[in-house]
C-alpha cells in the first residue's frame, strides 16, 4: 500500500477502519433503525435459515434418486421423486424471492429513515459547521455513503449469516454421509480460508480508496458546477479540465485496483474448487469400488455409492457459490459499517445553536443593544472588539467600513448564527440567549447581497412554503416593493418557475424577490447587508423605494457601500478591523477632520464626481 493511500484511508474513518471485523456499538446503532421493521427483520432471518436448510435437501434427494431408483431400475417411484424435487425447487425459489425482497425492502427503509434524520440534522447545524465542510462531502454522505448502509441488509449481515449457515450445513451433511470422504474432499479448505482472508484485507483498503475518491469527485463537481460562470468568464475550462482529468484518473485507478484483486481471487477459488473435485472423484471412485465389496462382507456397512458422489458434487457446487462471495460480502458489511460510522459522525455533530431560551411570544419592539461585545470565528482571533451601541425601536443604524471590517459578523451574531465570545447582546432588554432561537430569527429579516432562490415558483420562493402566508399577502407585498409589474409579466406570473439559483432572473429582480420575502414575514427588525450592491441604477431607485417601505415602523441595520443610501440613518457606525472608530449622524461624522467617514465620503462623492 502506498503511503499516500494509507494516509487517505486513515483519515477517513479511524474507528471502523482499524477496528475489529465488526464494531458492535456501531452495529447496534444501525439496528436501532431496524426497530420499526422488527417483524420484517425476523421474517427475513427466518427465511434465511430456512433457505440454508432447504438447500441441502436437494443433494440428498439426488443421492436417493440415483441409488434407490435409477441404478435399481425402479421407474415407478422415480416420478414421485421428480415431483418432490420440483416441489423443493419451487419452495426454495419462492423463499428466495421473499428473502431477497424483504432484505432489500428493509435496507431501503432503514436508509430512508436515516436520510430523513440526516437531512433534518444538517439543516439544523450552525453555519460554522458549513464553513469547514464542503457541500460535496455532505452530498456524498447523504447519498452514496447511505447506500452502503442499505447493503448491510441486502448483501451484508443477513446474507453472510445465511451463507455461513449453508456452509456449515453442507459440511455437516458431507460428514454425515461419509466422514472420510468429506475430510479428503475438503483438504484444500484451509488454503481457501487463507486466500479469502488475504483478499478481504486487500480489497478493504482499495474500497476505502474508492470511497475517498468518490467524495473527491463529488466535491470537485459540486464546486465547479456552482462556480461555472467563474470558470467560463476567465476561460479556465482547459485548466479545470486538466484538474478534473487528474481526479477522474485517481478514481479510475482506485476502481481498477479493487477489480484487480478480484481478477486474482476468483481464479484462485476456481483452482481450489477444481482440486476439491479432483480429490472427490479420485478418492470417491476408489471408495465406491472397495465399498461394494465391503457391503458383501458386512451388510451393515454404510457404503459410498454413485449417489453419494453425485450428492457430493451438488454439495460442493452449493458450497462454493457462497464461499466465492463471502469475502466480498464481508467487505460490503465493512463498507456499510464505514458508511454508518461517517453518517453517525454527521448525526453526532453537536454544532447546533443551543436553544435554551424560552421567550417566544409577543411582538418584539426592536430595541437592540450591544454591550462590550467581543467575537471571534476561531479561538481568540477577535473579529469584533469591544462593540457598544444602542438602536432604539424604529431607528435605523448604518454600518460602514472596509471589506473585512466586521460588518456582516455584527449581524450574524445578532441572529445567533454565531455565538459571541464576551459581552452581551439584548433585544428589547432581553439577552438574545433567553429567546427561543427560531422565534428570534423569525423577528429579524435579513436581506443579503447574494440572493438564493430555489428551483420553485416565485410565490414559493417568497413564502418559503410557509402555508400561513396567503397569495394576497404575497401580491400585496410585491406591490409595496414595486415588483408586482415585473412578476406579472413573467410567463405564469407568481407561478413562474425560477430555475436553479435564480438563474433565469436578473440580479435586481432576484434582489426584489428577497425584499418581498422579508416583507411578507413582517419582521420587527430588518437587516440589509449590501442588498443594493449588485443592481443597476434604475433598479436601485426601485429598491431604494422598497427599502424605505420596508423600514417603516421597523428597526433597521443597514450595511451599504454607497453612502447615498445611508445618509438618512439615525446613526452611522464606522468599523475598522473590528473596532468602532466613529459613531454619529451623517452630518456629525462629516465634521470630523481627517475622520474615516469623511475620507470615505470624499472618495465617493468628490474624486469620482458621482455618487456610486
Ligand atoms: N465564516 C467565517 N469564518 C472565519 N472567519 C470569517 C468568517 N467570515 C468572515 N470571517 C473573517 O472575519 C472578518 C470580518 O468579516 P466580515 O464580517 O464578513 O466583514 P465585512 O462584512 O465587513 O466585509 C474578516 O477578516 C473575515 O476574513
Ligand atoms: Mg460583509
Image: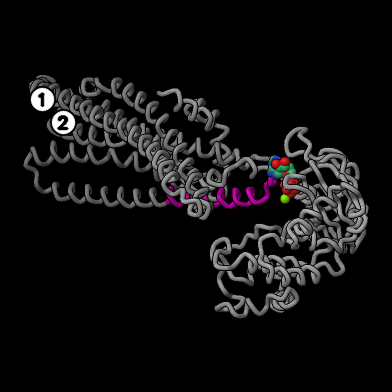
Which residue is found at the position 76% from the left and 71% from the top? 546
- Which residue position is annotated with label 1? 285
Q: Main secondary structure of the magenta part?
A: helix
Residue ID for mark 2: 309
From the top left corner, tell me how far across and down residue 85 is, in percent: 22, 47
- Based on the displayed image, in which of its 4 quarters is residue 188 positioned? top left
Tag shown at residue 439: none
Name above or below for residue 495 compared with residue 280.
Answer: below
The quadrant holding residue 189 is top left
Crowdedness of circle 2 by 10 Å Cα count: few (<14), some, many (20+)? many
Q: Residue at 34% x, 39% y: name it.
A: 52
The residue lying at 38 percent from left, 35 percent from top is: 254
The segment highlighted magenta reads 102-127
- Asked if the residue at tag 1 contacts the one at tag 2, i.e. Cβ–Cβ closer than 8 Å, the answer is yes
- At label 1, counting other C-alpha atoms closer than 10 Å, the crowd grade (few under 14, some 14-19, many 20 or more) is some
Give the x, y percent position of residue 342. Answer: 55, 38
Expressed as whole percent of the image width and height from the top left, the position of residue 231 reads: 49, 51
Q: CA distance from mark 2 to mark 1?
A: 8 Å
At 87% from the left edge and 68% from the top edge, which residue is drawn?
Answer: 553
The one nearer the camera, 147 or 170, is 147
Judging depth in this view, the residue of 433 and 572 nearest the camera is 572
Q: Is residue 568 left or right of residue 250?
A: right
Amino acid at each position: 500500500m502506498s503511503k499516500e493511500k494509507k494516509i487517505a484511508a486513515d483519515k477517513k474513518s479511524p474507528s471502523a477502519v482499524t477496528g475489529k471485523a465488526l464494531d458492535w456499538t456501531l452495529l447496534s446503532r444501525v439496528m436501532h433503525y431496524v426497530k420499526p421493521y422488527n417483524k420484517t427483520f425476523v421474517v427475513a432471518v427466518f427465511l434465511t435459515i430456512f433457505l440454508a436448510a432447504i438447500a441441502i435437501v436437494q443433494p440428498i434427494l439426488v443421492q436417493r434418486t440415483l441409488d434407490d431408483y435409477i441404478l435399481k431400475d425402479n421407474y415407478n417411484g422415480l416420478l414421485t421423486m421428480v415431483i418432490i424435487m420440483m416441489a423443493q425447487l419451487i419452495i426454495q425459489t419462492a423463499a428466495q424471492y421473499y428473502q431477497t425482497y424483504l432484505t432489500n425492502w428493509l435496507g431501503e427503509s432503514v436508509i430512508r429513515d436515516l436520510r430523513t434524520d440526516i437531512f433534518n440534522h444538517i439543516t439544523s447545524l450552525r453555519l460554522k459547521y458549513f464553513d469547514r465542510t464542503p457541500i460535496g462531502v455532505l452530498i456524498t454522505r447523504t447519498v452514496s455513503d447511505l447506500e452502503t448502509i442499505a447493503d448491510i441488509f441486502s448483501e451484508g449481515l443477513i446474507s453472510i449469516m445465511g451463507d455461513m449457515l449453508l456452509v456449515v450445513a453442507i459440511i455437516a451433511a458431507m460428514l454425515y454421509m461419509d466422514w472420510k470422504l468429506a475430510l479428503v474432499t475438503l483438504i484444500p479448505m484451509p488454503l481457501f480460508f487463507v486466500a479469502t482472508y488475504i483478499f478481504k484485507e486487500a480489497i478493504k483498503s482499495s474500497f476505502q480508496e474508492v470511497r475517498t475518491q468518490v467524495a473527491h469527485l463529488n466535491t470537485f463537481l459540486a464546486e465547479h458546477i456552482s462556480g461555472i460562470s467563474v470558470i467560463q468568464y476567465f476561460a479556465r475550462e482547459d485548466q479545470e479540465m486538466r484538474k478534473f482529468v487528474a481526479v477522474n484518473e485517481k478514481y479510475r485507478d482506485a476502481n481498477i485496483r479493487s477489480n484487480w484483486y478480484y481478477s486474482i481471487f476468483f481464479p484462485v477459488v476456481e483452482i481450489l474448487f477444481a482440486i476439491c473435485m479432483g480429490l472427490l472423484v479420485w478418492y470417491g471412485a476408489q471408495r465406491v469400488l472397495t465399498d461394494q465389496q465391503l457391503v458383501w462382507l458386512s451388510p451393515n456397512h454404510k457404503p459410498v455409492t454413485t449417489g453419494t458422489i453425485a450428492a457430493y458434487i451438488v454439495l460442493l457446487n452449493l458450497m462454493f457459490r457462497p464461499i466465492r462471495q463471502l469475502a466480498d460480502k464481508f467487505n460490503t458489511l465493512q463498507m456499510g459499517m464505514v458508511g454508518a460510522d461517517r453518517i453517525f459522525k454527521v448525526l453526532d455533530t453537536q454544532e447546533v445553536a443551543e436553544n435554551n431560551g424560552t421567550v417566544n411570544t409577543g411582538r418584539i419592539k426592536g430595541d437592540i443593544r450591544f454591550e462590550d461585545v467581543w467575537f471571534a470565528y476561531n479561538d481568540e482571533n477577535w473579529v469584533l472588539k469591544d462593540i457598544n451601541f444602542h438602536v432604539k425601536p424604529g431607528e435605523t443604524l448604518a454600518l460602514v467600513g472596509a471589506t473585512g471590517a466586521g460588518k456582516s459578523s455584527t449581524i450574524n451574531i445578532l441572529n445567533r448564527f454565531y455565538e459571541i465570545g464576551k459581552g452581551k447582546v439584548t433585544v428589547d432588554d432581553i439577552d438574545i440567549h433567553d429567546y427561543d432561537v427560531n422565534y428570534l430569527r423569525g423577528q429579524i429579516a435579513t436581506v443579503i447581497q447574494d440572493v438564493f432562490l430555489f428551483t420553485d415558483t416565485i410565490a414559493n420562493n417568497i413564502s418559503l412554503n410557509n402555508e400561513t402566508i396567503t397569495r394576497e399577502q404575497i401580491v400585496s407585498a410585491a406591490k409595496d416593493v414595486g415588483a408586482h409589474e415585473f412578476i406579472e409579466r413573467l410567463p405564469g406570473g407568481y407561478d413562474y418557475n425560477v430555475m436553479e439559483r435564480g438563474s433565469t432572473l436578473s440580479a435586481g429582480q432576484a434582489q426584489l424577490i428577497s425584499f418581498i420575502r422579508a416583507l411578507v414575514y413582517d419582521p420587527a427588525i430588518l437587516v440589509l447587508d449590501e442588498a443594493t450592491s449588485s443592481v443597476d441604477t434604475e433598479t436601485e431607485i426601485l429598491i431604494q423605494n422598497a427599502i424605505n417601505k420596508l423600514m417603516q415602523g421597523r428597526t433597521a441595520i443597514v450595511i451599504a457601500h454607497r453612502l447615498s443610501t445611508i445618509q438618512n440613518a439615525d446613526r452611522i457606525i464606522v468599523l475598522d478591523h473590528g473596532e468602532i472608530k466613529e459613531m454619529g449622524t451623517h452630518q456629525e461624522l462629516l465634521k470630523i477632520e481627517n475622520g474615516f467617514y469623511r475620507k470615505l465620503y470624499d472618495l465617493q462623492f468628490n474624486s469620482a464626481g458621482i455618487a456610486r
